[in-house]
Image (tube, coloured by chain):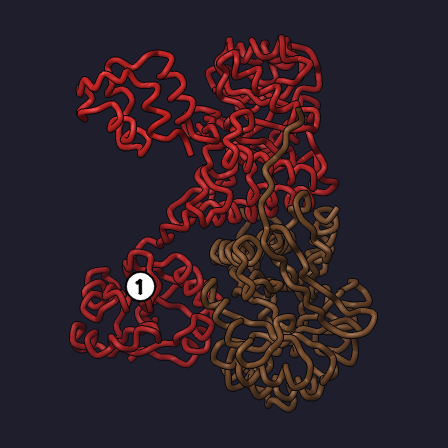
Chain colours: A brown, B red
Amino acid sequence: MAFEPTKQKYTGAIRQVTLGTGPKAVTVGGRSCFPFYTFEGSMPNAPRIAMEVWDKNPGDDWPAAAREPFADVLDDPAAWAKKCVEVYGAEMIALQTRSADPNADNRPAEEVAAVVKKVVDAVDVPVIVWGVANHEKDIEVMRLVAEQCSGKRLALAPVEEGDHKQIGASCMAYGHVVVASSPIDVNLAKQLNVLLGNLGVRDDNILIDPTTGALGYGLEYTYSVMERITQAALAQGDDKLANPIINNIGIEVWKTKEAGQSAEEAPELGDPKMRAIMMEAVTAVSFLLAGSDIVVLRHPETVKLVKGYIEKMMA
Amino acid sequence: MGMTGIEIFKLLPKTNCGECGVSTCLAFAMNLAAGKAELASCPYVSEEAKKILAEQSAPPIRTVVIGTGNYATKVGGELVQFRHEKTFNNPTGLGCVISTDESDASIEGKLNRFKALQFERVGITMRPEFIAIQDKTNDPAKYKAFVEKIMGLTDAALILVSPNPDVMEAALSVAKDRKPLIYAVTMKNGPKMAPIAKKYECPVAIRSDGTLDTAMKITQNLTKMEIKDIVIDTGVRDLKTAFTHSVQIRRAALVDRQRALGFPTIVFANEMASTPEEEAIVAATFIAKYGGIVLLSDLQPHFVYPLLLQRLNIFTDPQRPMTAEPGVYPINNPNENSPILVTCNFSLTYFIVSGEIESSRQPAWLVVKDTEGLSVMTAWAAGKFSGEDVGAWIKKCGVLDKVKHKSVVIPGYAAAISGELEEELSGYNVVVGPREASQITKFLKAFTPQ
């Protein structure tokens, strides 16, 4: 008699969330099994990759290897986003509004929002707008972004407990998706989804950001929280956690020491560019296996590699 | 998991002699079931019962030791499917394949990289453990000589790769004391290969035909011969199928207590990808998802280092926070005018804070205080980051002798201790630094110790 492996009993499925509009809109979620366990459940939508774009020239904040593919567009976020789509086949853009950071450039909200609008108008793929995790500033910027990009079904991030009312309301008013961000904790993730529900945000307009730790810098905490969220949603019937998960990976990995060290600084770690790309790719693969639906990645070679990986795992 | 007290009771003598220390056999059986007694305490239990109980109480996935000395490497022995349920125990063994048809330069390069890949992190040495030696000669004497040569060049845990029992036996005659993994017993060569594994008492891998059914048949055959140290290769080289098998094997062993699959696995990532980059992410898949051993074609540090970090992260015990060694860390060559910054010894905090200071390019003395692995805020709340404690440590650790100034910077989240700390360190200014590490660069650029 042929061996019959035990099947996991699933009680629910991750709900589907659609970003963007028109032919390039992207739907994620819908999964009714643990990530890639398609022998016992279905994964109607493959996980997707969003390419990271900054609203300012990142300069020395980015290691040379990360700047190099975008050297011609780093000063023009719209051209940068276009290059991601047209040259590197990006299916989504994650625009980080770094220029808004009150501890750095502190560019006024109107100017930040105007650049976001330019980027959104320059591409036909969905855009995730990722703020600076400063409540006051993010509320100001996201209110303008939500209004000026009305109906584009952007995803606005990070929406935390401290600013969920304001940014949540902006999303509801102008038809955007909320990226509910909580600090590596299952209960806090659930609580924020409940709060957003109380506010009136529809369940299928929420993505979960569990807070992403890079490889070597807390990856294991994020990994296990994601597995626990996935288990709660799929096997323990916790409807309030049954939302797709997004991981903001590029920015976390590329700021680590090892991703930035030159061959002279760390000869024992091999080729600096390949090392950083592999750190980003290994982080992405780990989180895809833990339940990520959208990974935000920086380097085009990482994107290519992870895209090929997802295709193989979806076979 | 295991047998109930009543099931165990049925196998006991039922004489209630009391020599085991409890008054009845039933009470003893209950203690056995609860893991509170050892079967050896019963002087009258039958051999038959001993055998059944030993089998039933064996761990669901066998721990197999490959290699000797510094490289005696444990694989398998896992008890959970998800690390947060308890912890993963034995990190996926990593290594590369060396083939008999490779040039000396290529072999030397791989072995040098193997040796050089040793990294210290949070008190743990990260390194690959395995060298697989693949035969392409099909000639016992030639393979034996090749294995001997490699043995002379490395202490690595070895995997001998040949389907030919004669070739394998020749190599084992010289390598057996290194406890190499024999790769592999198949359905076809089993009748000749299995007795060799038995004779040389080395762990043995099986290679199936791509199905779990055949894998189970082969392991059952070996178990009948009382060969216990088995490693499974299902023979699949397609990523998705191999992933599915890996999940199913882990689950069958743990949930169904399927003995025939209760063994660690081996993954030949080098045969599953067309580029080294792809190979590395195949390896990453099986570090996260249940691979016992993962082999690469080479050990270039830019591929292996990320995998070692991933392995460290995934196999970290979630029940026990990782800690940094308390002490004084000089960063960016500080001198007597450089600021003193204090933080906790939660490893993540240490990595992030030291990383931010490094990238600020500002010299500083980082004082790490023992908080038993708690973060600053948690440690403060738990009374392990009080002004008194922190002050005492700052005096004791010797950092004050390294500077001329009179300032100490504490984390923003511990602002509440500043008064108490100033009392403890009389004559010093206690400066409240940023709450988040991301603000350290900005802080340091504007800060001059007084």
Relative placement, left or right, of A84 versus B98 is right
Q: What element carries label 1?
A: strand
Kind of residue at badge 1 = Val
Note whether B183 is above or below A156 in the view shown.
above
Note whether B297 is above or below B371 in the view shown.
above
Determine if residue B442 is in view.
yes
Nearest the viewer among A59 and A9 is: A9
Q: Quadrant of residue A2?
A: top right
Q: Dot 1 falls on which chain?
A: B
Give the crowd class for mark 1: few <14, some 14-19, many >=20 residues within 10 Å. many
Labels in figure, total: 1
- Position in image of residue B152 (x %, y %): 52, 21
Q: Which residue is at a point 58% across and 47% down the rendered structure image? A: A9
Q: Quadrant of residue B238?
A: top right
Note whether B59 is above or below A113 in the view shown.
above
Q: Which residue is at a point 66% across and 24% down the rendered structure image? A: A1
Q: Which residue is at a point 57% across and 60% down the rendered structure image? A: A253
Query: To which residue does mark 1 refer?
Result: B367
Note whether B55 is above or below B189 in the view shown.
below
- Position in image of residue B363 (x %, y %): 40, 68
Q: Quadrant of the C terminus of chain B?
A: bottom left
